[in-house]
Image (cartoon, grey):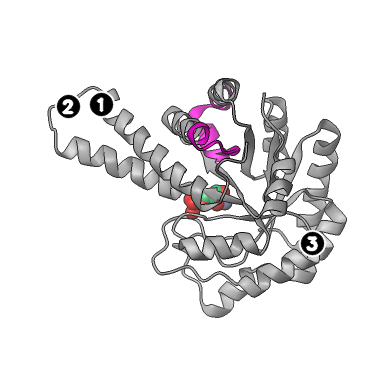
Amino acid sequence: GFGSFNSWLHDGLNKGYAVAQININNLEFVQAIIEAAEEEKAPVILGASEGALKYMGIDYAVAICRTAAERATVPVMLHLDHGPNLEWVLKAIRYGFSSVMIDASHLPLEDNIALTKKVVDLCHPLGIEVEAELGRITGTDDDLTVDERLATLCRPDDAMRFVEETHVDALAAAIGSAHGHYHGTPQLDFERLAAIREATQIPLVLHGGSGIPDEDVKKAISLGIAKMNINTDNQEVFTKKVRQILASNETLYDPRKYLGPGRDAIKEMVKSKLRLTGSVNRV
Ligand code: G3H
Ligand code: ZN
């Protein structure tokens, strides 16, 4: 079965590493992630978003992930990424996810607290751990002014109240990272991160992990990031490899001939992320 993520996040906090959440998009992603985690002896969290679950079919997705977890000798967690509402949380519980994220970050603070607390009260008696989001983690294509950007960031005093009232297990606090392909260099607010860590004392999650300079990732981990989410970097290397093979071979028709190399490209990228987060040789 799937491992529980919280003990690993706390192990990371104690020892100075972060657990990687690698998002799944299809069968090849799951296989690549598990092979990388096996070879690097790293615990790993499979992240499944609503979009990915709709694309794969939640039943197919869970069956593939469960098979992967059963084969693996390293701990494998299955986490609902950016759960949009109670309906998706319930669906994830029903299908056997080991943890969920409820993302109510677009709601006013009071409503975010209320919905997150509802999810925690539902999940904790079932042994399911909960991540929530505070502040708004934007997309890299969102065109924000300096003031608008500042307004999206998580406030340490809000974070303290949020954690006290919801008893959430892990917090995705907006500190300036964004989802997707960065156009410039991301500007992480490390002072804010340290203050949120101080105020909450729980594992913090860095979303939009693709494209953040290695030194910044390491600094964020030293300041309390215990989980880092990655998707775009894997999508990019996979698609680049497939595109390259198809472009150089117009008569190729066997999908295995391009999906296989695409899968290998993901595996190498995942290994580099496991090394970057310091999660290798932890099991
Ligand atoms: O929740 C998923 C992650 O935050 C992925 O972000 O695609 O920018 O790596 P990314
Ligand atoms: Zn995210």
Dot 2 falls on a residue whose secondary structure is loop
**Disc 1: which residue:** 257
- 32 is higher (above) or lower (below) than 162: above
Q: Amino acid at mark 2?
A: Leu
- Please indicate whether residue 227 sits to the left or right of residue 11 in the image: left
Magenta range is 37-62
- Please indicate whether residue 224 sits to the left or right of residue 62 in the image: right
Dot 3 falls on a residue whose secondary structure is helix
**Disc 3: which residue:** 200
Marks 1 and 2, the one that precedes in the sequence: 2
Q: Amino acid at mark 3?
A: Thr
Q: Amino acid at mark 1?
A: Lys
The residue at label 2 has a CB less than 8 Å from ligand 1 = no
The crowd level at tag 2 (other Cα within 10 Å; few <14, some 14-19, many 20+) is: few
**In terms of depth relative to the viewer, which is nearer, 265 or 120?**
265
- Please indicate whether residue 49 sits to the left or right of residue 253 in the image: right
**Disc 2: which residue:** 252
Contact (Cβ within 8 Å) of mark 1 with mark 2: yes
Spatial CA span between label 3 and label 2: 54 Å
Residue at 33 percent of width and 35 percent of height:
262
The crowd level at tag 3 (other Cα within 10 Å; few <14, some 14-19, many 20+) is: many
The image quadrant that residue 147 belongs to is bottom right
* Label placed on residue 136: none
**Residue 45 counted in the magenta span:** yes
Residue at 63 percent of width and 39 percent of height:
80
